[in-house]
């Protein structure tokens, strides 16, 4: 993420410092999610994020419609953060998975 964005109060307010245990859960969940997509859709593969984007050099699942990449770690960190911010909102994970599945047609 560019420095000018990282330095804004809005960006800082949305950051979470996950515990070591939580980070392990997020990493495991992220790679499990990515592997589920790779095994479910033969055209999807593991790769490294496009360096032209903020997800450059991150582990991603490639092969989605329109060249989209699924940056599994970033997506799962955001989903867990969203769930923490909005504990009463159901379907956060399911909605995200459904939206990514629509990009495999």
Image (cartoon, rainbow, N blue to C red):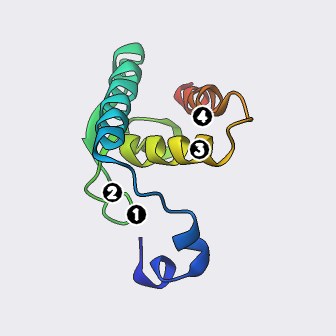
Q: Residues within 10 Å of mark 3 (few under 14, many from 20)?
A: few
Give the camera-side residue of 22 and 100.
22
- Determine the CA span between mark 1 and mark 4: 20 Å
Q: Nearer the viewer, mark 1 or mark 3?
A: 3
Residue 69: image quadrant is: top left
Q: Residues within 10 Å of mark 1 (few under 14, many from 20)?
A: few
- Determine the CA span between mark 1 and mark 3: 26 Å
Return the residue at label 1. 53
Return the residue at label 4. 96
Residue at image location 50% in from the left, 78% down from the top: 5
* Dot placed on the residue nearer the N-terminal end, 2 or 3: 2
Instruction: Evaluate if marks 1 and 2 touch, with contact meaning CB atoms under 8 Å apart.
Output: yes
Residue 53: image quadrant is: bottom left
Q: Measured along the vertical axis of the image, is residue 58 above or below residue 1?
A: above
- Determine the CA span between mark 2 and mark 3: 29 Å
Describe the element under mark 3 as helix, strand or loop.
helix
Give the camera-side residue of 26 and 42.
26
| Quarter of the rendering occupied by the N terminus | bottom left
Q: Is residue 68 visible?
A: no
Residue at image location 37% in from the left, 44% down from the top: 73
Q: Nearer the viewer, mark 4 or mark 3?
A: 3
Describe the element under mark 2 as helix, strand or loop.
loop
* Dot placed on the residue nearer the N-terminal end, 1 or 4: 1
Describe the element under mark 4 as helix, strand or loop.
helix
Mark carried by residue 84: 3
Task: Residue 68 in the image: state x and y as whole percent.
Answer: 47, 45
Q: Measured along the vertical axis of the image, is residue 46 above or below residue 7?
A: above
């Amino acid at each position: 993420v560019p420095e000018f964005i990282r330095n804004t109060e809005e960006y800082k307010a949305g950051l979470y410092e996950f515990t070591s245990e939580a980070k392990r859960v997020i990493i495991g969940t992220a790679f499990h999610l990515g592997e589920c997509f790779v095994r479910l859709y033969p055209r999807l593969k593991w790769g490294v994020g496009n360096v032209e984007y903020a997800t450059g050099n991150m582990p991603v699942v490639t092969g989605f419609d329109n060249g989209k990449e699924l940056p599994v770690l970033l997506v799962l960190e955001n989903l867990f953060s969203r769930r923490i911010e909005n504990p009463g909102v159901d379907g956060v994970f399911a909605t995200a998975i459904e939206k990514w599945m629509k990009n495999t047609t």
